[in-house]
Amino acid sequence: MKAIVGRSYWTRQIRETIERIAPHTSSVLITGPSGTGKELIARSIHDQSPRATGPFIPVDCASVPGSLFASQLFGHTKGAFTGAVGASLGSFRAASGGTIFLDEVGELDLELQAKLLRVIQQRQVVPVGGHDPEPIDVRIIAATNRDLAAEVKAGRFRLDLFYRLDVISIETKALQDRREDIAPLAEFFIEQVSREQGVPPKRLSPAAVRAIESFDWPGNVRQLQNILERSIVLSEGEEIDADFIPQEIAAAAQPDLQPTGDTISTPNHQVNTPAAATNAEGYPADWQSLEDNERLHLQRTLELTGFNQSAAARLLNIDYRLLLRRIKKYGLKPAGGAGGNGNRPRVAAAHGG
Protein backbone atom coordinates (compact mmCIF):
# COMPACT_ATOMS: atom_id res chain seq x y z
CA MET A 1 0.00 0.00 0.00
CA LYS A 2 2.96 2.35 -0.50
CA ALA A 3 1.13 4.07 -3.36
CA ILE A 4 -1.57 5.51 -1.07
CA VAL A 5 0.42 8.33 0.52
CA GLY A 6 -0.86 10.37 3.45
CA ARG A 7 -1.53 10.36 7.17
CA SER A 8 -5.08 11.72 7.38
CA TYR A 9 -7.91 9.69 8.88
CA TRP A 10 -9.47 9.39 5.42
CA THR A 11 -6.27 7.98 3.90
CA ARG A 12 -5.91 5.43 6.68
CA GLN A 13 -9.53 4.36 6.18
CA ILE A 14 -9.02 4.02 2.42
CA ARG A 15 -6.04 1.74 2.94
CA GLU A 16 -8.08 -0.44 5.30
CA THR A 17 -11.06 -0.52 2.93
CA ILE A 18 -8.89 -1.61 0.02
CA GLU A 19 -7.43 -4.44 2.08
CA ARG A 20 -10.94 -5.65 2.95
CA ILE A 21 -12.48 -5.55 -0.51
CA ALA A 22 -9.50 -6.50 -2.70
CA PRO A 23 -9.83 -10.32 -2.27
CA HIS A 24 -13.40 -10.29 -3.62
CA THR A 25 -14.80 -9.88 -7.15
CA SER A 26 -17.70 -7.51 -6.41
CA SER A 27 -18.03 -4.40 -8.56
CA VAL A 28 -16.75 -1.15 -7.02
CA LEU A 29 -17.93 2.39 -7.70
CA ILE A 30 -15.47 5.16 -6.78
CA THR A 31 -16.87 8.69 -6.63
CA GLY A 32 -15.43 12.08 -5.77
CA PRO A 33 -13.91 15.25 -7.25
CA SER A 34 -11.53 15.11 -10.20
CA GLY A 35 -7.88 14.64 -9.33
CA THR A 36 -8.46 12.90 -5.99
CA GLY A 37 -7.00 9.48 -6.80
CA LYS A 38 -9.83 7.37 -8.17
CA GLU A 39 -7.66 5.47 -10.65
CA LEU A 40 -4.97 4.97 -8.03
CA ILE A 41 -7.50 3.40 -5.69
CA ALA A 42 -8.72 1.14 -8.50
CA ARG A 43 -5.16 0.03 -9.26
CA SER A 44 -4.49 -0.61 -5.57
CA ILE A 45 -7.58 -2.83 -5.35
CA HIS A 46 -6.37 -4.76 -8.39
CA ASP A 47 -2.79 -5.06 -7.11
CA GLN A 48 -3.93 -6.58 -3.80
CA SER A 49 -6.46 -8.93 -5.35
CA PRO A 50 -6.06 -12.53 -6.58
CA ARG A 51 -6.20 -10.96 -10.08
CA ALA A 52 -2.99 -8.99 -9.54
CA THR A 53 -1.10 -11.11 -12.09
CA GLY A 54 -3.77 -10.35 -14.70
CA PRO A 55 -4.15 -7.15 -16.71
CA PHE A 56 -5.51 -3.83 -15.45
CA ILE A 57 -7.25 -2.12 -18.37
CA PRO A 58 -8.34 1.55 -17.89
CA VAL A 59 -11.00 3.01 -20.21
CA ASP A 60 -11.71 6.75 -20.29
CA CYS A 61 -15.44 6.72 -21.03
CA ALA A 62 -15.46 10.49 -21.54
CA SER A 63 -13.12 10.31 -24.51
CA VAL A 64 -14.56 7.30 -26.36
CA PRO A 65 -16.76 8.48 -29.26
CA GLY A 66 -20.15 6.81 -29.35
CA SER A 67 -19.49 5.35 -32.80
CA LEU A 68 -16.36 3.57 -31.52
CA PHE A 69 -17.63 2.61 -28.08
CA ALA A 70 -18.74 -0.94 -28.93
CA SER A 71 -15.58 -1.65 -30.91
CA GLN A 72 -13.22 -0.35 -28.22
CA LEU A 73 -14.94 -2.14 -25.35
CA PHE A 74 -16.23 -5.31 -27.00
CA GLY A 75 -13.84 -5.73 -29.93
CA HIS A 76 -14.56 -6.33 -33.61
CA THR A 77 -13.97 -8.86 -36.34
CA LYS A 78 -11.82 -8.29 -39.39
CA GLY A 79 -13.72 -6.28 -41.98
CA ALA A 80 -16.51 -5.36 -39.54
CA PHE A 81 -16.33 -1.76 -40.75
CA THR A 82 -14.20 0.44 -42.94
CA GLY A 83 -10.68 0.46 -41.57
CA ALA A 84 -11.05 -2.78 -39.59
CA VAL A 85 -8.06 -4.45 -41.27
CA GLY A 86 -7.74 -6.92 -38.43
CA ALA A 87 -9.70 -8.32 -35.51
CA SER A 88 -9.62 -6.61 -32.11
CA LEU A 89 -10.18 -8.10 -28.66
CA GLY A 90 -11.66 -4.95 -27.14
CA SER A 91 -11.06 -3.78 -23.57
CA PHE A 92 -13.30 -6.33 -21.85
CA ARG A 93 -11.66 -9.38 -23.41
CA ALA A 94 -8.21 -7.79 -23.09
CA ALA A 95 -8.88 -7.55 -19.32
CA SER A 96 -9.71 -11.27 -19.04
CA GLY A 97 -8.48 -12.63 -15.72
CA GLY A 98 -7.90 -9.10 -14.46
CA THR A 99 -9.70 -5.81 -13.88
CA ILE A 100 -11.35 -3.29 -16.19
CA PHE A 101 -11.51 0.29 -14.89
CA LEU A 102 -14.32 2.37 -16.39
CA ASP A 103 -13.22 5.93 -15.63
CA GLU A 104 -15.81 8.74 -15.89
CA VAL A 105 -18.61 6.24 -16.44
CA GLY A 106 -21.12 9.01 -15.70
CA GLU A 107 -20.27 10.61 -19.07
CA LEU A 108 -21.83 7.77 -21.10
CA ASP A 109 -25.10 8.54 -22.85
CA LEU A 110 -28.15 6.35 -22.24
CA GLU A 111 -27.70 4.23 -25.37
CA LEU A 112 -24.13 3.32 -24.43
CA GLN A 113 -25.23 2.67 -20.83
CA ALA A 114 -27.70 0.07 -22.14
CA LYS A 115 -24.94 -1.73 -24.06
CA LEU A 116 -22.68 -1.73 -21.02
CA LEU A 117 -25.48 -3.02 -18.78
CA ARG A 118 -26.14 -5.95 -21.13
CA VAL A 119 -22.49 -7.00 -20.99
CA ILE A 120 -22.35 -6.77 -17.20
CA GLN A 121 -25.54 -8.80 -16.80
CA GLN A 122 -24.67 -11.51 -19.29
CA ARG A 123 -20.93 -11.60 -18.60
CA GLN A 124 -20.27 -11.95 -22.30
CA VAL A 125 -19.62 -9.71 -25.29
CA VAL A 126 -20.46 -9.93 -28.97
CA PRO A 127 -17.70 -8.32 -31.07
CA VAL A 128 -18.80 -5.82 -33.69
CA GLY A 129 -19.33 -7.73 -36.92
CA GLY A 130 -19.63 -11.05 -35.09
CA HIS A 131 -22.54 -13.20 -33.98
CA ASP A 132 -21.20 -15.55 -31.33
CA PRO A 133 -20.99 -14.26 -27.74
CA GLU A 134 -17.62 -14.45 -26.04
CA PRO A 135 -17.49 -15.01 -22.25
CA ILE A 136 -15.60 -12.48 -20.14
CA ASP A 137 -13.91 -12.93 -16.77
CA VAL A 138 -13.24 -9.46 -15.37
CA ARG A 139 -13.72 -7.47 -12.21
CA ILE A 140 -15.40 -4.15 -12.92
CA ILE A 141 -14.35 -0.97 -11.12
CA ALA A 142 -16.01 2.27 -12.23
CA ALA A 143 -15.38 5.88 -11.27
CA THR A 144 -17.08 9.23 -11.74
CA ASN A 145 -17.01 12.76 -10.39
CA ARG A 146 -20.78 12.98 -10.84
CA ASP A 147 -23.45 12.19 -8.23
CA LEU A 148 -24.93 9.15 -9.99
CA ALA A 149 -27.91 8.96 -7.63
CA ALA A 150 -28.81 12.52 -8.67
CA GLU A 151 -28.15 11.62 -12.31
CA VAL A 152 -30.61 8.72 -11.98
CA LYS A 153 -33.30 11.05 -10.60
CA ALA A 154 -32.66 13.46 -13.47
CA GLY A 155 -33.09 10.64 -15.99
CA ARG A 156 -29.50 10.85 -17.24
CA PHE A 157 -28.26 7.56 -15.80
CA ARG A 158 -29.92 4.15 -15.77
CA LEU A 159 -31.02 2.94 -12.35
CA ASP A 160 -30.32 -0.72 -13.20
CA LEU A 161 -26.77 0.09 -14.31
CA PHE A 162 -26.22 2.18 -11.18
CA TYR A 163 -27.16 -0.80 -9.00
CA ARG A 164 -24.89 -3.09 -11.00
CA LEU A 165 -21.91 -0.81 -10.49
CA ASP A 166 -22.60 0.42 -6.96
CA VAL A 167 -22.14 -2.88 -5.10
CA ILE A 168 -19.26 -1.45 -3.04
CA SER A 169 -18.91 2.34 -2.80
CA ILE A 170 -15.80 4.38 -2.11
CA GLU A 171 -15.91 8.18 -1.93
CA THR A 172 -12.75 10.23 -2.30
CA LYS A 173 -12.17 13.58 -0.62
CA ALA A 174 -10.85 16.88 -1.90
CA LEU A 175 -7.30 17.71 -0.85
CA GLN A 176 -8.43 20.79 1.09
CA ASP A 177 -10.48 18.46 3.32
CA ARG A 178 -7.42 16.36 4.22
CA ARG A 179 -4.64 18.87 4.60
CA GLU A 180 -2.58 16.44 6.69
CA ASP A 181 -1.83 14.64 3.43
CA ILE A 182 -0.40 17.65 1.58
CA ALA A 183 3.14 17.57 3.00
CA PRO A 184 3.60 13.76 2.68
CA LEU A 185 2.29 13.90 -0.89
CA ALA A 186 4.64 16.76 -1.69
CA GLU A 187 7.62 14.81 -0.36
CA PHE A 188 6.60 11.81 -2.45
CA PHE A 189 6.22 13.84 -5.64
CA ILE A 190 9.46 15.74 -5.14
CA GLU A 191 11.42 12.52 -4.68
CA GLN A 192 9.76 10.91 -7.68
CA VAL A 193 10.03 13.87 -10.05
CA SER A 194 13.64 14.54 -9.03
CA ARG A 195 14.45 10.93 -9.87
CA GLU A 196 12.64 11.11 -13.21
CA GLN A 197 14.33 14.42 -14.11
CA GLY A 198 17.75 13.09 -13.11
CA VAL A 199 18.40 15.85 -10.58
CA PRO A 200 19.52 15.56 -6.93
CA PRO A 201 16.62 15.17 -4.46
CA LYS A 202 15.18 18.50 -3.36
CA ARG A 203 13.17 19.63 -0.36
CA LEU A 204 10.61 22.33 0.36
CA SER A 205 11.58 25.23 2.58
CA PRO A 206 9.43 25.81 5.70
CA ALA A 207 7.84 28.82 3.95
CA ALA A 208 6.98 26.72 0.91
CA VAL A 209 5.45 24.01 3.11
CA ARG A 210 3.28 26.63 4.85
CA ALA A 211 2.18 27.92 1.45
CA ILE A 212 1.09 24.59 0.01
CA GLU A 213 -0.63 23.58 3.25
CA SER A 214 -2.62 26.84 3.30
CA PHE A 215 -3.81 26.67 -0.33
CA ASP A 216 -7.20 25.09 -1.14
CA TRP A 217 -6.04 23.17 -4.27
CA PRO A 218 -9.16 23.27 -6.47
CA GLY A 219 -7.41 20.87 -8.86
CA ASN A 220 -6.65 18.53 -5.96
CA VAL A 221 -3.64 16.21 -5.98
CA ARG A 222 -3.17 16.43 -9.73
CA GLN A 223 -2.68 20.21 -9.40
CA LEU A 224 -0.26 19.74 -6.50
CA GLN A 225 1.81 17.34 -8.60
CA ASN A 226 1.84 19.75 -11.53
CA ILE A 227 2.96 22.72 -9.40
CA LEU A 228 5.71 20.74 -7.67
CA GLU A 229 7.09 19.42 -10.95
CA ARG A 230 7.25 22.99 -12.28
CA SER A 231 8.97 24.18 -9.09
CA ILE A 232 11.59 21.42 -9.29
CA VAL A 233 12.43 22.33 -12.88
CA LEU A 234 12.68 26.08 -12.18
CA SER A 235 14.44 26.05 -8.81
CA GLU A 236 18.17 25.85 -8.23
CA GLY A 237 19.95 24.19 -5.35
CA GLU A 238 18.58 21.60 -2.97
CA GLU A 239 15.77 23.68 -1.48
CA ILE A 240 12.56 24.86 -3.14
CA ASP A 241 11.66 28.19 -1.58
CA ALA A 242 8.27 29.88 -1.68
CA ASP A 243 9.64 32.11 -4.46
CA PHE A 244 9.33 29.16 -6.83
CA ILE A 245 5.69 28.50 -5.85
CA PRO A 246 3.08 30.36 -7.96
CA GLN A 247 2.10 33.68 -6.37
CA GLU A 248 -1.55 32.78 -5.79
CA ILE A 249 -0.46 29.69 -3.82
CA ALA A 250 2.31 31.39 -1.86
CA ALA A 251 -0.07 34.23 -0.96
CA ALA A 252 -2.45 31.75 0.67
CA ALA A 253 -0.06 31.46 3.62
CA GLN A 254 -0.01 35.26 4.07
CA PRO A 255 -3.54 36.50 3.36
CA ASP A 256 -2.91 39.83 5.09
CA LEU A 257 -0.25 40.69 2.53
CA GLN A 258 -2.48 40.24 -0.51
CA PRO A 259 -3.34 43.49 -2.32
CA THR A 260 -6.99 44.48 -2.05
CA GLY A 261 -7.19 47.52 -4.33
CA ASP A 262 -5.30 50.34 -5.96
CA THR A 263 -3.89 51.71 -2.68
CA ILE A 264 -0.90 50.20 -0.89
CA SER A 265 -1.04 50.78 2.87
CA THR A 266 1.82 50.77 5.34
CA PRO A 267 1.77 51.58 9.08
CA ASN A 268 3.00 55.18 8.45
CA HIS A 269 1.79 56.25 5.05
CA GLN A 270 -0.21 55.45 1.91
CA VAL A 271 1.07 55.27 -1.63
CA ASN A 272 -1.42 55.57 -4.46
CA THR A 273 -0.64 53.57 -7.57
CA PRO A 274 -0.56 55.50 -10.87
CA ALA A 275 -3.87 55.81 -12.66
CA ALA A 276 -4.34 53.41 -15.56
CA ALA A 277 -4.22 54.87 -19.09
CA THR A 278 -7.63 55.54 -20.60
CA ASN A 279 -8.95 55.75 -24.14
CA ALA A 280 -10.89 58.61 -25.72
CA GLU A 281 -14.09 57.45 -24.02
CA GLY A 282 -12.48 57.40 -20.59
CA TYR A 283 -12.33 53.63 -20.32
CA PRO A 284 -9.13 51.64 -19.53
CA ALA A 285 -7.00 51.53 -22.67
CA ASP A 286 -5.64 48.06 -21.92
CA TRP A 287 -9.02 46.44 -21.22
CA GLN A 288 -8.90 42.82 -22.35
CA SER A 289 -11.18 41.60 -25.11
CA LEU A 290 -13.64 38.75 -24.55
CA GLU A 291 -11.44 36.57 -26.75
CA ASP A 292 -8.34 37.39 -24.66
CA ASN A 293 -10.20 36.50 -21.47
CA GLU A 294 -11.47 33.24 -22.97
CA ARG A 295 -7.99 32.22 -24.10
CA LEU A 296 -6.47 33.05 -20.70
CA HIS A 297 -9.21 31.23 -18.78
CA LEU A 298 -8.87 28.14 -20.98
CA GLN A 299 -5.09 28.10 -20.50
CA ARG A 300 -5.41 28.43 -16.72
CA THR A 301 -8.03 25.67 -16.58
CA LEU A 302 -5.91 23.31 -18.67
CA GLU A 303 -2.88 23.98 -16.49
CA LEU A 304 -5.00 23.45 -13.38
CA THR A 305 -6.02 19.99 -14.62
CA GLY A 306 -2.54 19.08 -15.86
CA PHE A 307 -3.88 19.41 -19.44
CA ASN A 308 -6.40 16.62 -18.84
CA GLN A 309 -8.83 17.82 -21.48
CA SER A 310 -11.76 15.69 -20.27
CA ALA A 311 -11.43 17.10 -16.75
CA ALA A 312 -11.04 20.62 -18.11
CA ALA A 313 -14.22 20.32 -20.18
CA ARG A 314 -16.16 19.19 -17.12
CA LEU A 315 -14.72 21.98 -14.98
CA LEU A 316 -15.68 24.54 -17.62
CA ASN A 317 -19.07 22.87 -18.11
CA ILE A 318 -18.66 22.77 -21.90
CA ASP A 319 -18.75 20.03 -24.50
CA TYR A 320 -15.46 18.14 -24.87
CA ARG A 321 -15.43 18.70 -28.64
CA LEU A 322 -15.96 22.43 -28.16
CA LEU A 323 -12.93 22.53 -25.87
CA LEU A 324 -10.82 20.76 -28.50
CA ARG A 325 -11.84 23.38 -31.08
CA ARG A 326 -10.91 26.21 -28.71
CA ILE A 327 -7.53 24.58 -27.94
CA LYS A 328 -6.83 24.41 -31.67
CA LYS A 329 -8.08 27.96 -32.25
CA TYR A 330 -5.80 29.50 -29.60
CA GLY A 331 -2.91 27.07 -30.06
CA LEU A 332 -2.93 26.17 -26.37
CA LYS A 333 -0.16 23.88 -25.20
CA PRO A 334 1.16 22.69 -21.84
CA ALA A 335 4.33 24.18 -20.41
CA GLY A 336 7.29 22.86 -22.37
CA GLY A 337 5.39 22.79 -25.66
CA ALA A 338 4.18 19.18 -25.55
CA GLY A 339 0.88 18.52 -27.21
CA GLY A 340 -2.00 18.33 -24.75
CA ASN A 341 -3.97 15.22 -25.63
CA GLY A 342 -5.60 14.75 -22.25
CA ASN A 343 -3.68 11.52 -21.63
CA ARG A 344 -0.85 12.81 -19.48
CA PRO A 345 0.60 9.95 -17.41
CA ARG A 346 -0.70 9.84 -13.89
CA VAL A 347 1.71 9.21 -11.07
CA ALA A 348 0.70 6.99 -8.14
CA ALA A 349 0.16 8.74 -4.85
CA ALA A 350 -3.51 9.14 -4.03
CA HIS A 351 -4.20 11.18 -7.13
CA GLY A 352 -5.36 11.05 -10.64
CA GLY A 353 -8.74 9.79 -11.61
Image (cartoon, rainbow, N blue to C red):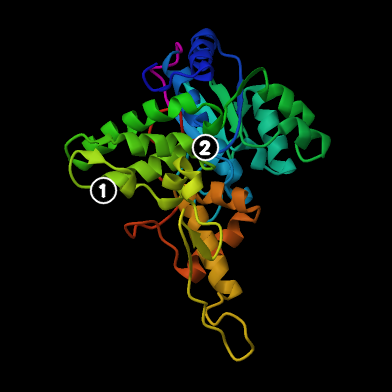
Residue type at the position of mark 1: Val
Indicate whether residue 50 is drawn in magenta. yes
Label 2 crowd bin: few (<14), some (14–19), many (20+), radius 10 Å: some
Residue ID for mark 2 = 59
Q: How many marks?
A: 2
Would you say 322 lies left or right of 202 here?
Answer: right
Q: Residue at x 52, y 49 (%)?
A: 79
Would you say 243 lies left or right of 293 here?
Answer: left
| Residue 164, x across and y down, in percent | 70, 22
Main SS class of the magenta portion in the image: loop
Q: Residue at x 60, y 15 (%)?
A: 26
Q: Which residues are magenta?
A: 49-55
Task: Check the image and name the residue furthest to the front.
Answer: 268
Q: Nearer the viewer, residue 243 or 274?
A: 274
Would you say 260 lies left or right of 161 here?
Answer: left
Residue ID for mark 1 = 233
Q: Nearer the viewer, residue 180 or 229?
A: 180
Residue type at the position of mark 2: Val
Q: Quadrant of residue 170?
A: top right
Q: Inspect this view and state whether residue 196 appears.
A: no
